Image: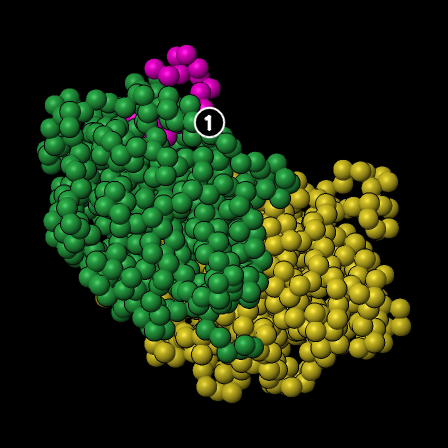
Chain colours: A green, B yellow
């Protein structure tokens, strides 16, 4: 194969998708609406107006199949999009598999992950609405970095509440956000009532995503020039991420391929939905028939071990109620290294699609994922973020099955970011200190006992 | 410009250059040869055989204008090459300049810099010669990461001596090399005579690039299955890097542009030579007439304040004597943040080209460079490594001059890597702690008094 095999399938900037795809109108039934936690009635646009600009609220509830991407957003997307689709020749050789493995690489974005796909339009629509400042939370740091970057480009201030433990352990993540001009606070902070209430008991509290959300929401709700931005879970976030799948469709078509299996990692669901929904459209229309599989960590398995029920989106119970696969909003996942997958719930839209039987789910232990990551780095070169190691491990399982069976399946996966800020997790694996947590059934049962009561 | 301006000029894999360019035969005179430090006679291939495989030694001295890139190397290059050329629309707008700024981005390589352009062929030729293990040194970590990556792909062991201070301060760099399978030692180590001799006096010695080179060379010279690899300075390294400039030529031609000014940063000179030499060929042939300018740090200004003389390549004085611009092999640069530019000398080939008057040189203080880096990150999105911030600052100076004069110059620069492992330097700048060292003339004079004596 010396000097001949094609590794990257690139698209020209002129081939960048100009519309996001909304899967809802193509589904046999719409997903259940979010409910107001007090009235238990469906949430309306006005309920959300203190937090989001109207353009995003309308995208959250739209029934249109396609939504135009504004020119200003396309202009920023072009800093890194269309992103490359890779054929993993070297990994295939190492596995001795007849399968053909393709991965869509989102780590080429300046922030290093798929998150800017939605951070950029969110910043744009807020700037267009005259908003001056965005607030948000960040755990692993990918989302905070993406929103800081997007805010810089649209002249918005950006204030990030970073989970305390992460703030202490990942100073580089904080500095990257500050390099983009954002202000980063250790959460819980003294700047909010929510933060102060917790610091009274423990000034050094390590924080949680739920607390950080409460702080960011509190600040946004109090200032008419400030809004809040969320990096996953919601419909408009998944909508924006569909550029991933739309590009991948064009790229596979350019080499005359159709996927037999699509695997992606799921935390809140935006990376997976972004890749999978355009292919699901093709599947529902009978134009292709891939198996679509969501991969989640064994220690935070909302699809495979959670229930499908109305639950709060945050730990503190302040958000609207969302119908989703959940481990219970009080479930605190073990501190696995893929911080971006440590969420108790799952995107309501993706949960609905799973409930409809249109996708499968699989939970994997983290040591298998890091073994896959090392094999990937030593063949394909890229050091993956901890989150997509789950997708790579699932792709390798599938390719190894092909080695056994002799099937020449086409496997598509999403490498949603690089691991340059996550090397402490690699050290944990390389040194043999990483273990697979075995979550006892009682812990799941305990957390599910706290679900809010919603009449059917 | 909404949704219309082209940001990236991409080449197809089929347009990847298949030859490296050697500038030597196009120069009015050849560069002076390296000398054996004992005999003061030109070094021959046999002198270098304990350290390098014969293919690389022959490339070091070749008089051929073009050298074919092996198919196995092209196959690895395709993991990230051709690299993108960007038009910096947003930076131009922020500067209000009529200039058009283009930057060639090498941070898309898995190792995050231009270094794999030579690490990959070096690993390939060593593997082809039956070598089992490569040794090298690394300071900032870019080169060690690149060689670790390349060694993994060609099944070589890789042993890296990492400057002690860097080893202590940059654990993520070390872990990235280990992720690729390399063995990383803190230098000075107990594994070599050179290291032990220093540790006798100070077991916690912070090390230096010179010491680390001595350790890596010592281990390679003692084992017939082991060779040594160098990441800059030498002719064959600059040769491999010319893929950068060859691609940039094709990319500018694709948008009907010719550069008026080319600026690149120089440490050992490989990134700059790689970008500049193909354009120098065009200039010498009368096909274009760019000003070509090397940019170095004010605290390590070998071209602008050094002398052109024979000197050792390492601090300890073990290497052949190289005719180059040097601050003296005992010059210890201040601890500026661009570790990759802290080298007392300059590539002999680039020094010769400078002496011939074919390129200019400029020294910049680091705070101006980081101010440029922030402006770049907040407009173009990419957070640059500390080294190319020097090139960006020089490009911005040139663009601002165009704002004054109204000239529509085309400025080309090389963004040779991202700064994901260098954010401590950004923190130093953002917090106001970064200062510009003012090196007194006596320090330069003192170091130059130690130059070896070589009869004219």
Question: In this orientation, does residue B414 appear?
Answer: no
Q: x, y (%) of residue A120?
A: 28, 49
Q: Is residue A216 magenta?
A: yes
Residue at horizontal 16%, vertical 38%?
Answer: A32
A239, above or below B295, in the image: above
Residue B400 picture quarter: bottom left
Nearer to the camera, A414 or B101: A414
Image quarter hosting the N terminus of chain B: bottom left
Residue placed furthest toward the right: B39
Q: Mark 1, chain letter?
A: A
Q: x, y (%) of residue A332?
A: 40, 27
Residue B343 picture quarter: bottom right
Nearer to the camera, B352 or B279: B279
Residue at horizontal 83%, vertical 62%?
Answer: B223
Residue at horizontal 70%, vertical 51%?
Answer: B183
B197, above or below B404, in the image: above
Nearer to the camera, B214 or B316: B214
Q: Which residue is mark 1?
A: A440
Please give the range of residues in magenta: A197-218
The answer to whether residue A412 is left or right of residue A30 is right
């Amino acid at each position: 194969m010396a000097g001949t095999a094609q590794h990257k399938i690139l698209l020209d900037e002129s081939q960048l998708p100009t519309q996001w795809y909304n899967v809802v109108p193509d589904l046999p039934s719409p997903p259940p609406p979010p409910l107001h936690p007090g009235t238990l009635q469906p949430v309306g646009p006005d309920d959300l107006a203190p937090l989001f600009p109207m353009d995003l609220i309308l995208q959250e509830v739209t029934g249109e199949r396609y939504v135009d991407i504004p020119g200003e957003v396309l202009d920023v997307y072009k800093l890194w999009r269309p992103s490359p689709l890779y054929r993993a020749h070297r990994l295939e050789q190492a596995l001795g598999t007849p399968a053909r493995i393709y991965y869509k690489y989102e780590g080429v974005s300046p922030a290093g992950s798929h998150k800017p796909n939605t951070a950029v339009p969110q910043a744009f629509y807020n700037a267009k609405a005259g908003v001056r400042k965005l607030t948000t939370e960040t755990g692993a740091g990918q989302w905070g970095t993406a929103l800081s970057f997007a805010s810089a480009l649209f002249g918005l201030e950006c204030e990030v509440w970073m989970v305390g433990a992460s703030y202490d352990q990942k100073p580089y993540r904080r500095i990257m956000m500050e390099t983009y001009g954002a202000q980063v606070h250790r959460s819980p902070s003294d700047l909010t009532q929510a933060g102060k209430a917790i610091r009274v008991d423990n000034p050094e509290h390590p924080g949680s995503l739920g607390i950080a959300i409460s702080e960011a929401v509190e600040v946004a709700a109090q200032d008419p020039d400030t809004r809040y931005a969320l990096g996953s879970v919601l419909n408009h976030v998944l909508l924006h991420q569909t550029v991933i799948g739309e590009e991948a469709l064009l790229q596979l078509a350019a080499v005359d391929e159709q996927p037999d299996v699509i695997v992606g990692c799921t935390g809140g669901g935006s990376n997976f939905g972004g890749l999978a929904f355009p292919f699901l459209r093709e599947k529902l229309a009978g134009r292709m028939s891939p198996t679509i599989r969501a991969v989640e960590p064994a220690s935070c398995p909302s699809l495979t071990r959670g229930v499908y029920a109305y639950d709060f989106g945050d730990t503190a119970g302040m958000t609207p109620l969302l119908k989703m696969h959940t481990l219970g909003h009080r479930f605190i996942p073990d501190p696995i290294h893929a911080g971006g997958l440590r969420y108790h719930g799952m995107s309501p839209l993706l949960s609905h699609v799973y409930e409809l039987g249109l996708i499968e789910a699989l939970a994997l232990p983290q040591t298998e994922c890091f073994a896959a990551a090392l094999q990937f780095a030593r063949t394909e070169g890229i050091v993956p973020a901890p989150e997509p190691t789950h997708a790579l491990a699932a792709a390798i399982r599938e390719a190894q099955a092909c080695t056994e069976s002799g099937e020449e399946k086409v496997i598509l996966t999403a490498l949603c970011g690089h691991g340059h800020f996550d090397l402490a997790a690699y050290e944990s694996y390389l040194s043999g200190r990483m273990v697979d947590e075995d979550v006892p059934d009682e812990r799941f049962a305990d957390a599910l006992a706290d679900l809010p009561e919603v009449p059917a």
